[in-house]
């Protein structure tokens, strides 16, 4: 039985909510006269002048929405990336050293390095902007068409007769009298004035699939539905913005509109800057890692070169070039290309990725929190079982229920539609009965009866309704074809069986019948005819799980993703759904328990539970954020108004195309297909995307570190620069362009089976372990050029630099094949064809450039043919040693990328 709420009993956390949460609750607990007086209104409605004044006072009846910013703002935001900031800083340094300083001295200027970096910055930002701008447009196109007109009672002045007119929904104001009918979306928070058998769906607000009864205050004590922890939706004599009318009609007075409504207060919580996600935190950590490496290496190179060469200006310029060389210049471009490729791959699976960063978060996700209604379930009631009184399958129960549902002439409720849908393709139903009369369903009797006759002149009454109401008018039951008296023992057994089904989350109806005397019976069906019925069976109804849900949950579990269910619905129903999906339900944690916990207490508990039931929207958000505080990358799958705040707070928010607009606006990813199997595909695509990003970062950063370490060694012993700054930039550019093919590479199956996150510690360790390996073979190349080919003086430095340029470029490119996988390359696995072709292209360019007419522009010269056998031996040794160290690294640290 519905109870009125005493606001004084709210917990401190609830009392901390904005006061507009309480206004509608206050109005629910006073008389209608008091409500009219408070809102300065009457049953005749407002005058047009009053409505205009209140519109100016309260504003338009619209909630805050998170909309995509203007295209120019989106373009600027596309460059808001720590990797790009690092590159911008290096471009500024390069401009100072290569252009501004030489120009002041009247020397030759060179903008090659600056141009290269600015091109990388531009391409990266533009690619990100175009992909996100395009997907935001697609997401906007998915917004549902909502009702914009409302029937309201308005008057021209105080003495005029009120008339029902159509009013723009945005122009509703507190005090308006409105009419609601089946199919309407509730346009504001309202207090009911008059109702007739009003059923309202609050699934979008509370997650409860079954509609609830609503009534005016005078009938409040008779309303029978469970309040749940979501207190305001539980009040019987109010309706909240965003819920919808399922059946019949009502008249109501508007209490709160726009941001003052309950829905509006939720919407305000999701507008504004998002908290940093797993991707943001990871990118920042890696950026600072690269900055720390530069902060250490650049001064060391400066001091060694300055002391050994004596020219501190040249040493400074070279040290700054080293800083540029240490940085993976293509990283922003590689990141954007990988994310965009992943987003386009998901688009082919009918998934809209609104924010590119969400692709990596999808792959890093190790906990998926999901709403129940409309996500794991179909969000509609289906007939689950048709049984006899003993709980055995019974076809007669289905036939009687079908006759009852198909012959009623009123608006068919959810149960009737479920019965008709279940029996839609059944060709053996008794179709030779015709309807005589009916007693429609109402909330007092809570049952529906029809009288029928067949071609032989037989008449019968068929009644379908709530358990206790049908039991009250029954005197017998049918058991195995025998009619027996319905004594107290049978009544108790039927009630216990129905209660057991309720415990499993089913809604139960009974079906009963009575033969009518064809001679003395009147044609009109009267309420007193509902008597002396014989019980024939029971029907159970449930919001069924989606056909793809079980397979999707299993696939996520196999790929290392825990699934937790966060719902506003009953723990019993949720546990039943979890059992159907093979989810270990455990002990549910309820909203009322969460409300009494501090954040520290709840943080310790969130990892121990799978089901969180009867949650308010803010409690869902608390669970998500505390899971994040425990080190998890959290996804949230939801479709309702009550999910919007949690979708906004999660690392990756996932919604569906038929979700509420506010849910789609809050989400990072929108699924256009009903199948949940696309979740697994998204997780794997995210891990593939991240794998290729981290592959480039690890290999390139370690290779660049090795080059810089080699320069550091060479600077201490060689009387000239081992490589010119322009050569270092050119080498990096050729290598980086070749790595644009990496987004099309594939990752090992073992890599994509586990959640993957940014790991700055492993990147730094990878650089320190793998970088010096290249330095070993760089040093052997130094020795080769110095001792074997006589490039041991300033006059022969071009030969020395050319020899190291080719060896460095080819080793850097070929080692990609060694380090891109933890397996044995070319034997256990092979890179994709784009990688193979770009590798071949780099080999041709690297060897051909010193022999080309452009060689003098880059300070290169042709090399003797005797150099190339040595080069082949060096590259072979490098590959073999890299493979050996890789195996030791994996054995020592238990990971590769």
Image (tube, helix red, strand yellow):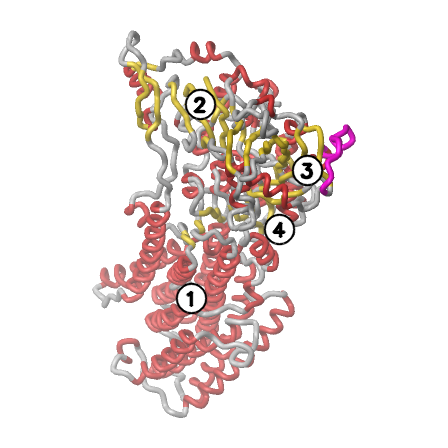
Q: Is residue 483 magenta?
A: yes
User: Could you classify mark 1 by the number of other residues whose Cα lies within 10 Å: few (under 14), some (14-19), or many (20 or more)?
Assistant: many
Q: Please say whether residue 415 is visible from this viewpoint.
A: no
**Looking at the image, is mark 4 or mark 1 nearer the viewer?**
4
Res 581 label: 4
Q: Which residue is mark 1?
A: 743
Q: CA distance from mark 3 to mark 1?
A: 51 Å
Above/below status of 227 relative to 583: above
Q: Which residue is mark 2?
A: 250
- Residue sticking out furthest to the left: 106
Q: Nearer the viewer, residue 627 or 380?
A: 380
SS at badge 3:
helix
Magenta highlight range: 481-495
Q: Is residue 297 magenta?
A: no
Where does residue 495 sit, x and y in percent of width and height?
Answer: 71, 32
Where does residue 792 sit, x and y in percent of width and height?
Answer: 40, 84
């Amino acid at each position: 039985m519905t109870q009125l709420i005493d606001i004084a009993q709210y917990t401190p956390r609830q009392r901390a909510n904005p006061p507009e949460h309480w206004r509608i609750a206050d109005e629910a607990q006073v008389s209608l006269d008091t409500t009219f007086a408070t809102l300065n209104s009457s049953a005749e409605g407002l005058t047009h002048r009053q409505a205009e004044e209140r519109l100016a006072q309260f504003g338009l009846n619209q909630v805050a929405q998170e909309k995509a910013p203007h295209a120019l703002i989106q373009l600027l935001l596309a460059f808001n990336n720590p990797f790009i900031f690092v590159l911008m800083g290096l471009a500024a340094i390069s401009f100072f050293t290569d252009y501004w300083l030489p120009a002041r001295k009247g020397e030759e200027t060179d903008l090659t390095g600056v141009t290269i970096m600015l091109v990388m910055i531009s391409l990266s930002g533009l690619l990100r902007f175009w992909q996100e701008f395009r997907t935001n447009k697609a997401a906007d196109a998915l917004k549902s068409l909502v009702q914009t007109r409302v029937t309201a009672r308005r008057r021209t002045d105080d003495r005029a007769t009120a008339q029902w007119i159509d009013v723009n929904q945005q122009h509703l104001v507190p005090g308006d009298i409105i009419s609601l009918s089946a199919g309407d979306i509730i346009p504001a928070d309202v207090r009911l004035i008059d109702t007739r058998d009003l059923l309202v769906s609050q699934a979008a607000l509370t997650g409860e699939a079954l509609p609830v009864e609503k009534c005016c205050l005078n009938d409040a004590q008779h309303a029978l539905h469970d309040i749940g922890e979501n207190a305001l939706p539980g009040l019987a004599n109010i309706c909240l913005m965003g819920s919808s009318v399922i059946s019949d009609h009502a008249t109501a007075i508007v209490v709160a509109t726009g941001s003052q409504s309950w829905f509006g207060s939720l919407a305000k919580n999701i507008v504004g800057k998002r908290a940093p996600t797993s991707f943001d935190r990871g990118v920042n950590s890696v950026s600072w890692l690269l900055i720390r490496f530069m902060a250490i290496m650049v001064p060391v190179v400066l001091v060694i070169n300055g002391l050994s060469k004596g020219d501190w200006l040249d040493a400074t310029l070279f040290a700054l070039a080293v800083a540029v060389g240490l940085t993976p210049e293509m990283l922003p471009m590689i990141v954007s290309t990988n994310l965009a490729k992943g987003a386009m791959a998901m688009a082919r699976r009918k998934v809209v990725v609104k924010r590119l960063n969400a692709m990596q978060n999808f792959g890093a996700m190790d906990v998926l929190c999901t709403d129940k209604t409309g996500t794991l379930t179909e969000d509609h009631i289906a007939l689950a079982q048709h049984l006899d009184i003993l709980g055995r399958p019974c076809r007669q129960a289905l036939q009687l229920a079908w006759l009852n549902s198909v012959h009623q002439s009123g608006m068919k409720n959810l149960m009737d539609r479920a019965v008709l849908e279940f029996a839609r393709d059944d060709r053996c139903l008794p179709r030779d009965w015709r309807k005589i009369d009916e007693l429609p369903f109402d909330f007092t009797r809570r049952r529906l009866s029809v009288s029928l006759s067949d071609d032989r002149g037989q008449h019968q009454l068929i009644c379908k309704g709530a358990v206790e109401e049908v039991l009250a008018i029954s005197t017998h039951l049918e058991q195995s074809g025998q009619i027996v008296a319905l004594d107290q023992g049978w009544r108790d057994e039927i009630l216990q069986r129905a209660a057991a089904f309720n415990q499993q989350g089913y809604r139960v109806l009974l079906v009963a019948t009575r033969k009518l005397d064809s001679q003395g019976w009147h044609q009109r069906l009267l309420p007193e005819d509902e008597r002396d019925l014989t019980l024939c069976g029971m029907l159970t109804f449930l919001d069924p799980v989606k056909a793809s849900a079980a397979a999707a949950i299993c696939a996520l579990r196999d790929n290392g993703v825990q699934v937790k269910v966060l719902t506003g619905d009953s723990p019993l129903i949720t546990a039943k759904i979890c059992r159907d999906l093979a989810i270990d339900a455990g002990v549910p944690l309820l909203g009322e328990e969460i409300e009494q916990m501090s954040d520290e207490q709840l943080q310790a508990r969130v990892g121990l539970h799978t089901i969180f039931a009867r949650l308010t929207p803010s409690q869902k958000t608390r669970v998500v954020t505390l899971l994040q505080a425990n080190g998890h990358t959290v996804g949230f799958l939801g479709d309702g108004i009550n999910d919007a705040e949690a979708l906004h707070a999660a690392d990756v928010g996932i919604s569906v195309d038929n979700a509420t607009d506010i849910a789609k606006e809050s989400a990072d990813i929108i699924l256009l297909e009903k199948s949940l199997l696309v979740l697994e595909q998204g997780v794997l695509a995210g891990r593939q995307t991240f794998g290729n990003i981290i592959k480039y970062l690890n290999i390139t950063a370690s290779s660049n570190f090795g080059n810089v370490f080699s320069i550091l060694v060479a600077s201490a012993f060689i009387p000239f620069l081992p490589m010119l700054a322009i050569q270092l930039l050119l080498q990096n550019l050729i290598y980086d362009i070749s790595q644009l093919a990496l987004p099309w590479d594939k990752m090992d199956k073992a890599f994509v089976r586990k959640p993957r996150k940014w790991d700055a510690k492993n990147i730094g360790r990878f650089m320190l372990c793998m970088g010096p390996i290249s330095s070993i073979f760089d040093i052997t190349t130094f020795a080769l050029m110095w001792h074997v080919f006589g490039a041991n003086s300033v006059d022969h430095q071009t030969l020395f630099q050319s020899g190291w340029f080719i060896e460095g470029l080819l080793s850097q490119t070929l080692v990609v094949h060694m380090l891109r996988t933890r397996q044995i390359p070319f034997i256990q696995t092979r890179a994709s064809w784009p990688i193979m072709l770009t590798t071949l292209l780099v080999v041709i360019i690297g060897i051909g450039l010193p022999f080309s007419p452009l060689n003098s522009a880059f300070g290169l010269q042709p090399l003797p043919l005797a150099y190339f056998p040595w080069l082949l031996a060096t590259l072979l040794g490098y590959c073999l040693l890299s493979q050996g160290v890789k195996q030791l690294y994996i054995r020592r640290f238990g990971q590769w990328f």
